[in-house]
Amino acid sequence: MQVVIEASALIYALLDGRPGALKVAEYWDASTELTLAEISLAEQLLVLARNVNDALRDAIASLNEFLNMDFNAVKQRSSKVRGYKNGAERIKDRIIEYLARLGLSLPLRDVYRQLALQLDRIAQNSDAIAYRLTVIASRGEKRFTSAFVTRLREMGDLVLREYETLLNSIRMLQENPRRSIDEARRVMLLEDEVDQRYRTLEVDVLEELKDDIIKLMIMREIIDLVEDTADVIKDAAENILFLALYKVTR
């Protein structure tokens, strides 16, 4: 970790043109600097991914608390998700700034940028899910059928597994790109399972809340956000897959 931090600091110094950094730079060629930039990026993306993991995990926990009709817990957890989302946004901004500083010298910088934005969007979706759960919880108790509860829980758990697999893929990107490839491909299989749950829930929610149009609209938005999150995780995995394949074939 210390090596990565020092490398990142030195790259910033080089970009700022500090004299002390230029002395060290005499012993480096462009490929060394590029490698260090990629190491630093991988580390920053991992920090972002872990923060997003906290946001998503709490959003899904809030969904389960809602299904258990623990509405006070739903309201309390929403602020935690908002905090994680805000933290993720700050980290994303630093990564974008870092990429801008590197300029065109970094191959595939657009892929790294897309990945940072995709991770941020997962955090944004998590915040939106948690907020909507507080809104629907404030509208009073509603008992859902056990079949609906089970399917919605399964969908949430699958999205968490999908993201955890993505997190493993990001973690392996630098140290074991081939393992990263395997994990990224697993993400895509899990996303297919989420889609199957979503198609069923699209119909189920209409039956569950047909007598309360406002709750129906909000719950439909929640289900759509969970499904959209699964799609974004898959998109992020495709970018990780591309980066890992690039590293393996270089």
Image (cartoon, rainbow, N blue to C red):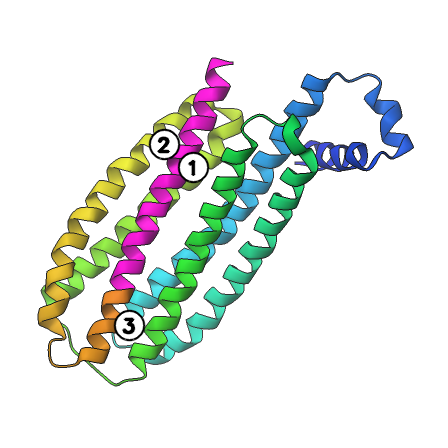
* Residue matched to label 3: 66
State left or right for residue 85 relative to residue 1. left
Helix, strand, or loop for circle 2? helix
* Closest to the observer, 77 or 121: 121
Instruction: Tell me which amino acid carries mark 2.
Output: Glu
| Label 2–label 1 contact, CB within 8 A | yes
Identify the residue position indicated by label 1 in the image: 168
Image position of 88 with respect to 131: above or below: above
Q: Residue furthest front?
A: 104
User: Residue at coordinates 38% horizontally, 33% vertically from top-left?
Assistant: 238
In front: 8, or 220? 220
Q: Splitting the image into 4 quarters, where does residue 74 fall?
A: bottom left
Q: Which residues are magenta?
A: 222-250
- The x and y percentages for residue 134 are 36, 76
Badge 1 element: helix
Disc 2 target residue: 183
Question: Could you tell me if residue 145 is visible in this image?
Answer: no
Side (left or right) of 1 relative to 229: right
Q: Position of residue 202 (x, y in %)?
A: 15, 60
The residue under the point 80% across, 32% down is 14
Residue 62 x, y percent position in the rendering? 35, 67
